[in-house]
Amino acid sequence: MVDETKESLASNIRAFIAERLAAKLEPLSKAAEKKRSETPADQLAQVETQLLSDREELIEQYKPENWLTDAARRAGQISMVTHAPKYTHSDTRSTGVLLRPEDKQRYTQSELYIDSLSLDDLPVDVVGNAAALDVARLLQLEGRDSTLLDEVAAGNSPALNELALSDEQAQEWLQGFQAALQDKALTSGQLSKQLYFPVAESYHLISPLYASSLSHNLHEKLTDSFYSEHTKTLRQARKGEKFHPDDLVIFPNIAIQSFGGTKPQNISQLNTKRYGRAYLLSSQPPNWEHKSSIPAKGKQAFWTEYNQRAWKTAKFLQRYLEGIFKRTSTLERRDRRAELVDELVDTLLLCAANIQHQSDKRGWSAESDLTLAEQLWLDPHRSELDAAFRTEREKKEWQGEIARQFAAWLNNQISKKSELLYAGDDEFHKWQKLLERKLLLLKDDLEVAA
């Protein structure tokens, strides 16, 4: 769909050239004023003539038809790329690659990895002569429904046709700008990384290129997550232990890779925008801490251990319920509440599984202070030693008792230190009714886990 609120691409090109002219005229005017102040009166007329000539020459140079002719001639000094070579070595002579949206159809995207094909829109990077970066900015100008780069890549540019004085001139510009889209020949410089891949009785030379566009997209995503006002609000809520309906996304253990040193512009245009930095996400596997403790001492030994793992989620649920206490019940809010309860149930089962799987300690519950239902649940391997225990366990009556204990624990967590959510007997039964389906599923999961 064409956005009629935007200026046409041809209008934006004219405005771009006019801005560049204005940037040149300002210092020229200042230099002219200084020249006039230093010139004797009898020579002023001659100087004024020269100053006027210089100004007219500059204005002539920046007429759209003249400036575009020069820009098209300089376009070959840069390359528009999505995968740039100089991230490997700043002096490499290798060529880059521009991955266009239509090119993605030639490749198969993997669902296991995030790569350049994962993005709907790849920001275009620029490598080459820094003095010709104005040509790159020109090609990236947007119109109502396309960029100049899109039109040049398609081989037909209505915007250039509108600005040109003749069809021949428009074609000359088009061919000139196309030189920035790809290098004349693919080359791999000796300073680049190179792999020789065996194919039949020969080899293919593979030169890995840095996915600059993908890196830039990741950089913007992470920068927003670090410094946006919304993120600051979420962090303040977390620091103040206050409820907020949105999730705070955190990227731990991030590394920063630098390219170009003090001259990031020598690498690429996007590298300059990133100040030479690129973020690397941690790929370290989780460091699981195996805890082999047995909750044998104290009547609340298991629930104390469970509370240490689940209290944060329970606290978040309490604040969420306080936040929606006087609001109309909606499907979204009920689903969110159910998700938090599911998370508590999952933590409960995981906590129990860590105890149940310690078969080398079978029978430990016989000397514990736990209730019979908790013994039957947490020490399943005791059935191998105690026939009466096995018979009692097979009745499965203990499952309902465990579910009721969980409901009591959750009821206590919700009402604890809350000015809004006081839970007496009536509230407890409401919670039991609300949790009835969850507890029925919980009983099935208790048997599976055991």
Image (tube, helix red, strand yellow):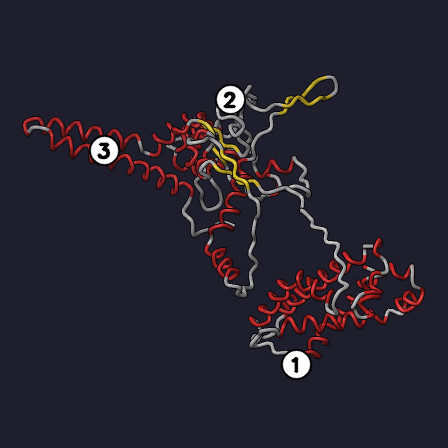
Q: Disc 3 designates what residue?
A: 28
x 67%, y 73%: residue: 411
In the image, which is nearer the foreground, mark 3 or mark 2? 2
Q: Earlier in the sequence, mark 1 or mark 2?
A: 2
x 61%, y 23%: residue: 194
Q: Position of residue 160 (x, y in %)?
A: 42, 35
Label 1 sits on what residue type? Gly
Tell me the crowding category of disc 1: few under 14, some 14 to 19, or many 20 or more residues within 10 angstroms, Cα based: few
x 8%, y 26%: residue: 43
Q: Earlier in the sequence, mark 3 or mark 2?
A: 3
On screen, residue 434 versus residue 392, left or right, reads left
Q: Disc 2 designates what residue?
A: 93
Tell me the crowding category of disc 3: few under 14, some 14 to 19, or many 20 or more residues within 10 angstroms, Cα based: some
Could you give the CA–CA distance between mark 1 and mark 2, rounded to whole angstroms? Answer: 76 Å
- Image quadrant where residue 10 sits: top left
Q: Disc 1 designates what residue?
A: 424
Label 2 sits on what residue type? Arg
